Amino acid sequence: MGGLSLGRLAFLALVVAIFAFVIAPLLTIVWVSFFSEKILAFPPTGYTISWYARASEIADFANGFLMSVKVGLCATVASLAIGVPAALAIERFPFPGRETIRQVLLSPMYVPAIVAGAAVYIYFIELEILTTFQLAATFSGLVIAHTLVALPWTLRLVCASLVSANTVSEEAARSLGANALQTFLYVTLPIIRPGMIAAAMFSFIASFSDLEKSLFLVGPGKTTLPIAILNYLEWSLDPTIAAVATVQILIIGTALIVSDRFVKLGKVF
Amino acid sequence: MAGVTLSNIRKTYGALAAVDDVSIEIRDGELLALLGPSGCGKTTTLRMIAGFVAPTSGTVKFGERDVTRVPVHKRNVGMVFQGYALFPHLTVAKNVEFGLRVRGWDKAKIAARVTEMLRWVQMEALAERSPRALSGGQQQRVALARAMANHPEVLLLDEPFSALDAKLRTQMRTEIRELQRQAGITSVFVTHDQEEAMAIADRIGVMNQGRLEQLGSAEDLYKRPVSRFVAGFIGKCNFIEGRVTGPGRFEAANGSVLQFTGAHAGGPAALCFRPEHAVLTQSGAAGNSIAVTVKSVTYLGPVTEYDLVSDAGDKLVVSASSSGDAAVPRAGDKLALGWRLEDAFVVD
């Protein structure tokens, strides 16, 4: 074994550089959240954890956080309720038009979120004019929009796990006397469970971090955390925002690591 | 236990007939092999017996019971899948008990039966293992125990040995055959490997393009194939092209007249014999020999193979045991190739 060749060294340097480019902003935010001055200055004169305490005292952040968690959980449940049966139908029954349905359900991923958010808003308003039923600026309206954000992730991940769990296991169950329901409960479901857990995690992350789709849909006193952050940033730039962002990074990072234990995420995309 | 009767079953996909008018009576306790190249309809036939595929027409009977419209899970078949299809999320014991649990057996009976089945296939020691931690042969034994746990009426095996390496394949097929015989269960297995079919099946059904070409014992198929396809698929075969011009009279393409036993309708046909049934001599008798030129000689240890071409242009192969002292023919030699009258047969 000789030393590293020049080409290999250059490649390693490139990998490190890309990794640093991705991770540096995140680390900077975490670092800044402990700076002691109110006005961001470099290098910091000292460190403190008081910004975390301050962040939790600001009602907009605390409420926004709770709102984001609630909306995220509801959207996750809704996207599983729609996405799992849809994935099953698409992967297990060869009906005409299933590719179209797949693409329609995945489309929220491709449409710019701000455009989709505006469209959902306009749709809600039109619906309200027609039926006097209010969805814009309500919790349900927000959950519906976030379900759209989450659904493509659920569909992707559950479809991927259905493809890798080939139908022969299901046939084996049928040949052993299991009816359709038993086959689903005892064979299909356990095999796709890791995919469903990953789907739930991703759905939650997608909803939790969504800003653009929610912008038009939140009502007074009912903002989500990303919108609370945006509102705060308009008036002040101090480490409180970094503290809030750090908490958000922690939550999302944990969810990603947990998902990866169930489904090797690299295999899905 | 019961036999299985397939009556005129057909399965069409659009204009294509995957299985075309197949009738087979599988005897009680028999091991029948469905043999053929890929796409011949053997797997579709097996899947119609299992109930995964509904025949377009025709009937499937287990004993006296017509199961044509009975769904898979109510047929009581045991099936061993290609690649075994063990449930990856369940242990060996849980795999075996699956069929009993979904059928609502009580706990004590299940435990006793699972133990019995695992002992039968010698897998008791590995009952708590995950299928992923098993070798191919062990997985196959578990698959068999799982398929047989509920006392099925019919055992179906879909290319059961294809995932194993050559040595293990030979060992497992003997083992499976022994277990099948002990259980006395009517069994159908699908394979594309003629040696495998001949080694363990009581009877073989040769399929081609959706049709059952011939059904019989390995010896029947080898000695008395009814079609050119069967003759060529089961073992090696030589074909001399020509026509049948009268009772027992065959005329080769170059006009030389040969004899054959048995009846065959007049018209274009081929006279066939096996490579080991022919001998090369200096001169041959009229009626059961032809003039050939040796193209190449291949020494294969116990036998030597000679590639020949007849005066009429047919490419032929003959194999002879490699005995030391006889004058060995060499490439370029012009000789006669003869055979015993009863070893030759005619096909379309």
Image (cartoon, coloured by chain):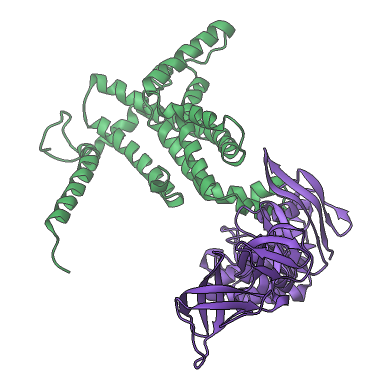
Chain colours: A green, B purple
Q: Residue at x 61, y 69 (%)?
A: B237
Which quadrant: the C terminus of chain B?
bottom right
B254 horizontally vs B345: left or right: left
Q: Residue at x 44, y 15 (%)?
A: A119
A32 horizontally vs A146: left or right: left
Front-lying residue, B238 or A72: B238
Query: Is residue B251 among the parts visible in the rendering?
Result: yes
B154 horizontally vs B273: left or right: right
Up-down relation of residue A100 to residue B100 (above or below)? above
Total labels drawn = 0
Question: Can you tell which quarter of the image residue B164 is in?
Answer: bottom right
Residue B106 horizontal/vertical position (percent): 78, 62
Query: Is residue B68 among the parts visible in the rendering?
Result: no
Up-down relation of residue B217 to residue B64 (above or below)? below
Q: Residue at x 57, y 78 (%)?
A: B336
Front-lying residue, A74 or B170: B170
Q: Residue at x 50, y 20 (%)?
A: A141
